[in-house]
Amino acid sequence: MTYLFISDLHLSPEHPRLVRGFLDLLVHYQHKQTQLYILGDWFNAWVGDDYSAPWLDEIVEALKAFNQKGNRVYFQVGNRDFALNQVFLNKFNGVLLPDIYDLNIAGHQYRLEHGDALCTDDISYQRFRKIIRNPLLVAFLRRTPLSFRTKLVNGFRKRSHSDKQHKSYEIMDVNKQAVLSAIKDVDVLIHGHTHRPAIHEVQNKQRIVLGDWKEDHAQILEINPSSNTQQLELIVWNY
């Protein structure tokens, strides 16, 4: 069994190379008994499950083929696609995970999350996150016209890009105390969001940061457990 972890793909029709990279990944791993975990920001934006387009249909068909080979796909929402829910995942038998998910692999305990909740120094973002992720607001927005949601999402994206221009990398990175709290009861913390792929040692434990997807490569995590060892590798996926 291969456990594969990716995040921050930011798939969209504007970046077909990223879409092709993801499709190639599914083909490469479909015969390896793979459990694929997508830890948020799978899509650059998600306006609703009623959105459809040829590029998205191609992804769904590839995921169906991937699952038909005995593989599984699990998804956690990110800050760009927090509105994506089980309705879309049902199209290919995917599974929606909670924002924080504990996974046991061969006796080792892993905590999975997107990572934005760990960036507690970014106070303005955390305030915005609390508002926009409110279940009542999300439920209301799902009932609005698709055209309205598209304009709203585009506005959020522009605001996010503008805000980042005025914030330091330190503010937008994870908070040390938040990490210590998150990793307290597990062996390994895996997250994305910060776009700073690395394996950090934290009090004799590991914090693994997944990479965002570029035009020709991404840094992803592969775990191949055996009876005695846990083969864990942050690898460069070229496409």
Image: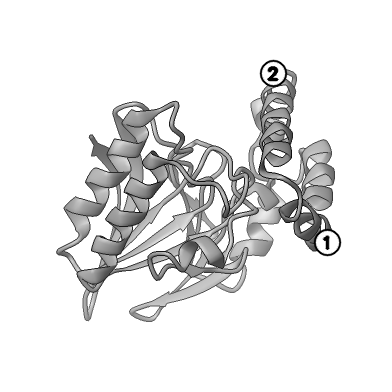
Disc nearest the viewer among 1 and 2: 1
Q: Quadrant of residue 101?
A: bottom right
- Residue in the foreground of this view, choosing between 165 and 189: 165
Q: Is residue 189 above or below residue 154?
A: below
Does residue 231 appear in this view? no
Tag 2, which secondary structure?
A: loop
Report whether 122 appears left or right of 64: right
Q: Is residue 74 above or below residue 121?
A: below
Relative image position of residue 164 (x, y in whole percent): 69, 24
Residue placed under numbered mark 2 in the picture: 165
The numbered dot on residue 136 is 1
Q: Is residue 128 above or below residue 17?
A: below
- Residue in the foreground of this view, choosing between 58 and 7: 58
Q: Which residue reaches farthest left? A: 31
Relative image position of residue 237 (x, y in whole percent): 26, 40
Check disc 1 and give the amino acid type: Leu
Q: Quadrant of the N terminus?
A: bottom left
Category of crowding for the residue at label 1, using alpha-carbon neighbours closer than 10 angstroms: few (below 14), some (14–19), many (at least 20): few
Check disc 2 and give the amino acid type: Gln
Q: Quadrant of residue 162?
A: top right
Relative image position of residue 41 (x, y in whole percent): 53, 45
- Residue in the foreground of this view, choosing between 58 and 177: 58
Q: CA distance from mark 1 to mark 2?
A: 31 Å
Q: Quadrant of the C terminus?
A: top left
Colour convention: one colour
Residue at 37 percent across and 48 percent down: it is 57
Q: Is residue 61 above or below residue 14?
A: below
